[in-house]
Image (cartoon, rainbow, N blue to C red):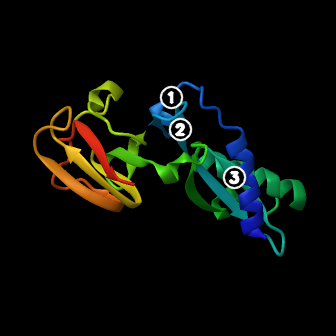
């Protein structure tokens, strides 16, 4: 029941996401520049639950504090105002992110400016001779390559200079952190 309810809440919150909003890094939004369509955003949210007796109450918010408050209010609607079973401190919360990417993420190389596939990201579906055109030159710190793909990362523009070849999976740019200026997809 909790999984079903959380899934419904996540879908409801995801449906409210608007990719045209102005990005404010202070509220947990990371820009994702997608070369195949319009910009998309990855937004961090918190989902909290309270389970007095056999009832389950869940709600989501952009901050854990907000999600705890909202689930407490929802619980009090069912259990009564001031119920000892609906305290914000007793809520169980988890953080997750909403990806508005229209399902393209599985067929693109994702590069990130932070470690562990975090931070601003760039979705790449074709060769990129100059990452500076997208504000990503010398910023790559981690990446996610689709299974079966082989990608070459170059230190110079237009596929010049030293290079590093990697295959599918989530990886860190250990040997070439913040050194990459162009990318070529060798195999899909």
Q: What residue is disc 1 on?
A: 23
Q: What whole-number distance in Å separates the C-alpha atoms at marks 1 and 2?
A: 9 Å
Residue 122, how many percent across, how many down? 40, 39
Q: What residue is disc 2 on?
A: 41
Tag 2's secondary structure?
A: strand
> For this rendering, which residue is in front, 73 or 164?
164
Q: 77 left or right of 108?
A: right
Residue name at image x 14 percent, y 37 percent: 160
Query: Of label 1 and label 2, which has the lower sequence position?
Result: 1
**In the displayed image of the protein, which residue is found farthest to the front?**
187
Residue 47, how many percent across, how many down? 65, 56
Residue 82, how many percent across, how many down? 82, 56
Q: Tags 1 and 2 in contact by the CB under 8 Å rule?
A: yes
The local crowd at label 1, few if under 14, some if 14 to 19, many if 20 or more residues have their Cα within 10 Å, is few
Residue name at image x 83 percent, y 75 percent: 54
Q: What residue is disc 3 on?
A: 10
């Amino acid at each position: 029941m909790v999984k079903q309810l959380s899934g419904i809440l996540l879908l409801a919150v995801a449906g409210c996401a608007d990719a045209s909003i102005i990005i404010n890094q202070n509220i947990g939004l990371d820009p994702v520049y997608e070369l195949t369509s319009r910009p998309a955003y990855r937004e961090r949210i918190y989902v909290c639950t309270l389970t007095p007796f056999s009832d389950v109450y869940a709600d989501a918010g952009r901050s854990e504090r907000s999600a705890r408050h909202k689930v407490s209010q929802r619980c009090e609607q069912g259990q009564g105002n001031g119920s000892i079973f609906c305290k914000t401190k007793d809520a169980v919360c988890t953080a997750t992110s909403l990806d508005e990417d229209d399902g393209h993420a599985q067929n693109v190389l994702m590069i990130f400016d932070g470690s562990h596939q975090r931070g601003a990201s760039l979705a790449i579906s074709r060769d990129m001779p100059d990452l500076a055109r997208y504000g990503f030159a010398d910023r790559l710190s981690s990446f996610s390559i689709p299974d079966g793909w082989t990608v070459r990362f170059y230190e110079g523009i237009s596929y010049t200079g030293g290079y590093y070849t990697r295959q599918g999976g989530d990886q860190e740019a250990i040997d070439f952190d913040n050194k990459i200026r162009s990318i070529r997809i060798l195999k899909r």
